Amino acid sequence: MPDTLSPSAPSATAPEPSLGDRIESRIARYETRQLDWNALKFQADYDPKYRRAQMRYVGTGATGVASDSNCVPAEHFTFSTMVLPAGCEGPLHLHDDVEEVFFILKGSRVKLMFESDGEYYETYMKERDLVSVPAGIYRGLVNEGIEEALMIVCLGTSIPETPTYPPSHPLSQIKRPKPATA
């Protein structure tokens, strides 16, 4: 008896998805996104000035959200938008493992702060400005404008390590909640 299946025998493997199915599984449409004001809620609970929202498209970023079935799985980077209300800030934090890109979609006065080896630098960005921050440099931002700012945030790996804060920063003493799933 031969070791092969006859051509009419049922296949044990599922058929390959079509190109259309493969592409559709990698589309994240705006109307299916939701602003997640809880992704960094532990910071806003400490001080309302840290209130901001994430809208995930590719991967979950480094906010502490463990998984989100509504976003495209990340293979090599993450991509999300971040809403930063007027007067609010993202505190200085460090990604040891990955570069981070900020692209300002909306906002006229977003201050970015950087710190490395005792040296401090700040600059202002506005709509359509971009900065790529190398791994190992503290980065933070403040919306000094009168309207909310909107930015794209990309991290150069599929699952970034949890960022840390400067030892002197009050958030470095707060125990982060276990990652949530969306």
Image: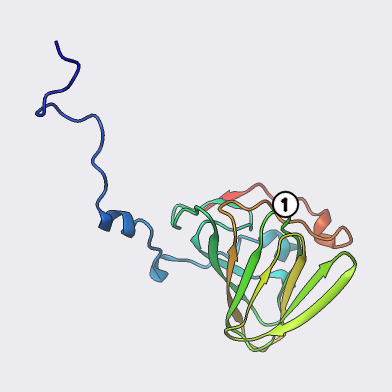
Q: Which amino acid does the dot numbered 1 rest on?
A: Arg
Q: Which residue is depicted at the point 55% across and 53% down?
A: 158
Of residues 15 and 36, the one drawn nearer to the viewer in this rendering: 15
Element under label 1?
Answer: loop
Q: Quadrant of residue 135?
A: bottom right
Q: Left or right: where does residue 86 sit relative to residue 22?
A: right
Q: In the picture provided, is 30 more to the left or to the right than 51?
A: left
Looking at the image, the residue that sits furthest to the left is: 8
Q: Quadrant of the N terminus?
A: top left
Residue bearing the label numbered 1: 176
Q: Position of residue 77 (x, y in %)?
A: 55, 58
Write the residue at 26% across / 33% down.
Answer: 13
Residue name at image x 72 percent, y 62 percent: 43
Q: Eyeballing the image, is 179 above or below 120?
A: above
Quarter of the image for residue 144 reads bottom right
**In the depicted view, which residue is nearer to us: 125 or 68?**
125
Residue 164 x, y percent position in the rendering: 76, 56
Q: How is the image coloured?
A: rainbow
Q: Which quarter of the figure has residue 92?
A: bottom right
Q: Residue furthest top?
A: 1
Question: 131 above or below 181?
Answer: below
- For the image shown, how many numbered marks are present on the structure? 1
Can I make out residue 75 in this image? yes
Quick check: can you spot residue 47? no
Q: What percent of the width, then of the height, locates residue 112?
A: 73, 77
Q: Is residue 7 above or below residue 181?
A: above
* Residue 100 location (% of width, % of height): 65, 65
Measuring 48% from the left and 66% from the top, which residue is drawn there? Answer: 34
Other residues around mark 1 within 10 Å, as few (<14) / some (14–19) / many (≥20): some
